[in-house]
C-alpha cells in the first residue's frame, strides 16, 4: 500500500495505473462504516484509493474542526488490512494553496435540511469532492447512505459537471443498538451515547407505521419527535420526509420516501435516515 501526500504524485500514480480505480473519500478516524465502503469499492474496481483529509471548508466557525478525531497511523493500518492500494493523505496547503478562491455549489439542494443549520457545509463538501475527482480521476466513488443529503448533492454535481464518475451509495452500518456509526460518536458522553439510540428507534417507529398503511407523514413526524424528546435530552434540529431520489416534497406518486433527522446530544450533532418504499 502506498501513502501519497501530494497531488503531483497522486496524478503520476493514476497515469501509471490504467486499471479501474474506485475512490473512497473520508475524513479519517476510520470505523466499520468506512471499512464497509472500502469493501464495496474493492468489489467495483481493480484499484482502491482512500482519501483521508479533514476538509476545513466544510466546517463553519465554531464547529469541531480543531477537535475532529484524527489517528492517521491507525487509519493506515486499517486500510492496509483491507487491501487498499493507495491512501491519499494531503495537507491543507496542498489542497487549498494560498489564493484559493474557487468553490463548487449545488444550488437547489444545499440550502435545505442540514444546509439550513450548516449553510456553508455543502459548498465545502462539493468543492473537496470535485477536487478529489479531478486529482484521482476515479471510475467510481463510494459514499455512505448515512449522509443521504450529501450523497444526493454529490450525485447531482457529478452529473451537472460531467465528471462521469459512477457514484455508489453503500448502506448504513449501525451499532448493536441501532445508532448509525460515525466518527463523531466519539464525542458522546456515556449518557448521551445511551440516549442516542432514540434516533433509530424513532425511524423504526415511522417504518412500522408506514408499513401498516399509514400515510399521514406529519403525524409520523410528531410521533417521532415525542419519542425522542420523552426518552432523551436531545435537541432536535429537524425531522423531515422527502422524495428519496430528489429531496423534493413528497407527492402522491413518490416511489421512495426518505425520512431523515438531525439532533444534538450536548454539542454533538448526529444525523440518520431510512428509506420507505
Image (cartoon, rainbow, N blue to C red):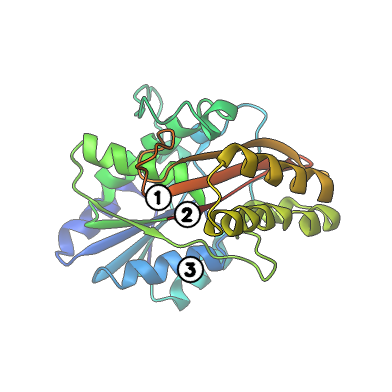
In this rendering, the count of numbered labels is 3
Q: Which residue is at a point 28% across and 53% down the rendered structure image?
A: 9
Q: Nearer the viewer, mark 2 or mark 3?
A: 2
Q: Nearer the viewer, mark 3 or mark 1?
A: 1
**Residue at figure coordinates x 34%, y 42% from the top left:** 253
Asked whether the viewer can see residue 183, the reply is yes
Q: How many C-alpha atoms fall within 10 Å of the one at disc 2: few (<14), some, or many (≥20)?
A: some
Q: Position of residue 151 (x, y in %)?
A: 40, 46
Position of residue 214 in the picture relative to residue 25 (left or right): right
- Above or below — where is 167 with respect to 243? below
- Tell me which label, 2 or 3, sits earlier in the chain: 3
Which image quadrant for residue 106? top left
Residue 35 circle label: 3
| Callout 1: SS | loop
Q: Which residue is mark 2?
A: 276
Determine which residue is flagged by label 1: 256
Q: Is residue 70 visible?
A: no
Q: Check whether the beta carbons of the residues at disc 1 and disc 2 lie within 8 A of each other.
A: yes
**Residue drawn where x is 45% and y is 33% of the image:** 122
- Number of the label disc, if any, that sits on residue 163: none
Q: Quadrant of the N terminus?
A: bottom left
Q: Residue furthest front?
A: 213
Task: State how far apart marks 3 and 1 are (Cα).
Answer: 27 Å
Amino acid at each position: 500500500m502506498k501513502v501519497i501526500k501530494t497531488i503531483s504524485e497522486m496524478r503520476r500514480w493514476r497515469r501509471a495505473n490504467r486499471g479501474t480505480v474506485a475512490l473512497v473519500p473520508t475524513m479519517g478516524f476510520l470505523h466499520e462504516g468506512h471499512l464497509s465502503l472500502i469493501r464495496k469499492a474493492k468489489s467495483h474496481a481493480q484499484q482502491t484509493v482512500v482519501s483521508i483529509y479533514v476538509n476545513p471548508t466544510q466546517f463553519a466557525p465554531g464547529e469541531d474542526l480543531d477537535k475532529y478525531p484524527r489517528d492517521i497511523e491507525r487509519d493506515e493500518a486499517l486500510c492496509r488490512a483491507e487491501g487498499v492500494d493507495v491512501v491519499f493523505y494531503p495537507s491543507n496547503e496542498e489542497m487549498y494553496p494560498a489564493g484559493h478562491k474557487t468553490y463548487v455549489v449545488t444550488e437547489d439542494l444545499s440550502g435545505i435540511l442540514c444546509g439550513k443549520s450548516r449553510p456553508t457545509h455543502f459548498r465545502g463538501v462539493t468543492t473537496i469532492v470535485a477536487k478529489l475527482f479531478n486529482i484521482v480521476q476515479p471510475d467510481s466513488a463510494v459514499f455512505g447512505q448515512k449522509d443521504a443529503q450529501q450523497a444526493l448533492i454529490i450525485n447531482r454535481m457529478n452529473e451537472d459537471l460531467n465528471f462521469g464518475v459512477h457514484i455508489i451509495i453503500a448502506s448504513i452500518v449501525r451499532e448493536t443498538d441501532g445508532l448509525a456509526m460515525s466518527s463523531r460518536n466519539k464525542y458522546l458522553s456515556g449518557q448521551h451515547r445511551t440516549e442516542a439510540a432514540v434516533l433509530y428507534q424513532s425511524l423504526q417507529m415511522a417504518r412500522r407505521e408506514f408499513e401498516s398503511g399509514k400515510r399521514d407523514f406529519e403525524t409520523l413526524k410528531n410521533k417521532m419527535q415525542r419519542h425522542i424528546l420523552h426518552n432523551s435530552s436531545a435537541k432536535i434540529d429537524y425531522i423531515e420526509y422527502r422524495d428519496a431520489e430528489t429531496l423534493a416534497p413528497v407527492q402522491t406518486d413518490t416511489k421512495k420516501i426518505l425520512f431523515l433527522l438531525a439532533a444534538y446530544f450536548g454539542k454533538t450533532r448526529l444525523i440518520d435516515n431510512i428509506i420507505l418504499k
